[in-house]
Amino acid sequence: MVNLNGTLVPNNEATVAINNRGLNYGDAVFETMRYSGGKIYFWEDHYFRLMASMRMLRMEIPMNFTMEFLEDEILRTVTTAEEKDATFRIKLLVWRKSGGKYTPETNDVAYSISCENLDTPFYVLTDANCEIELFKDHFITTSLLSTLKTNNRLINILGSIYAAENEFENCLLLNENKQVVEALNGNIFLISGNAIKTPPLADGCLNGILRKQLIAIIKLMPEFSIEEKSISPFELQKADEIFITNAIQGIVPVTKYRKKEYVNTTAKVLLPKLNLKARLS
């Protein structure tokens, strides 16, 4: 089932108007979340990121868009699924209501909530190959808009097509200063010895929920140091380990970049701590 503005409808009957502003102008923001064991992982962080994104895009936040209301709507949608106790990927999409061209007639919003099954009830590391390459056809701009989860994802789409055509599992995106910003579907972390780096938000990377959680976890581990610092492409082949993070998959170790192959030692140490924090969130 899909929740359209509070009304539950079957997936094959869920439709939006042809003049939908998310469809026509990318005038929409979204959150993708993991649901398992009766709870939404890191729900509070997702909620406040959504509210901040809506404010930045000058959307009118409805009075009833409280954390409790949206959580109840998500849970109500999940409980209509055939496998109520399954693990789900939840997508909460909010768009500005129809009307106008580039200048909207209203800042009021509509929303949808959809879900799809996931295979595992918690984050796991897979043994699958994850060979990456740089995507250099287009660049992310170093602006606050780049840190938001909006419907403007053409660079990610084109990068994903490039990866598929060249048999890479993922690509890394660069900003206009030729600094490594993020992967196609998540933030990146580089490990050299006990030093861990991830690009700063000022470089244009997504303000990722898992990024935030892992930074907090690593800061409590005296055996590691963590810094948010710009990453040059030349650093990739010098690193001992690289991994990608997102709210659905958790930690995805990179196995190869060009001639360099990587270990996943640090990822194995961090994963149980991340799963514990997710369950307690």
Image: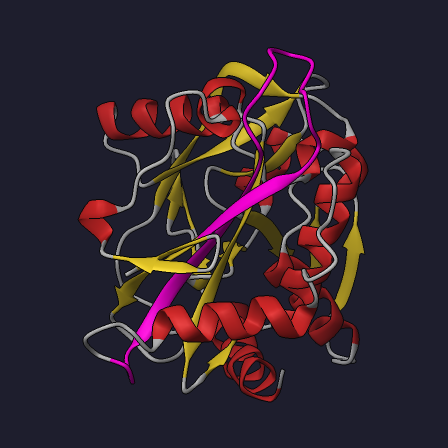
Residue 273 x/y as whole percent? 58, 83
Q: Is residue 143 visible?
A: yes
The residue nearer to you, when weighing 147 against 12, is: 12
With respect to residue 236, does 196 lie above or below? below
Query: What residue is rendered at 41% in x and 87% in y?
Result: 37
- As for residue 104 lying within the magenta part, the answer is yes
Quarter of image, res 57:
top right
The residue nearer to you, when weighing 106 against 205, is: 106
Quarter of image, res 8:
bottom left
With respect to residue 150, does 277 lie above or below? below
With respect to residue 15, does 136 lie above or below? above
Quarter of image, res 35:
bottom left
Quarter of the image where the C terminus is located: bottom right
Q: Is residue 193 visible?
A: no
Residue 279 x/y as whole percent? 54, 86
Query: What residue is rendered at 68% in x and 69% in y?
Result: 67
Magenta-drawn segment? 84-112
Position of 206 with respect to 142 (left or right) is left
Residue 155 x/y as whole percent? 49, 23
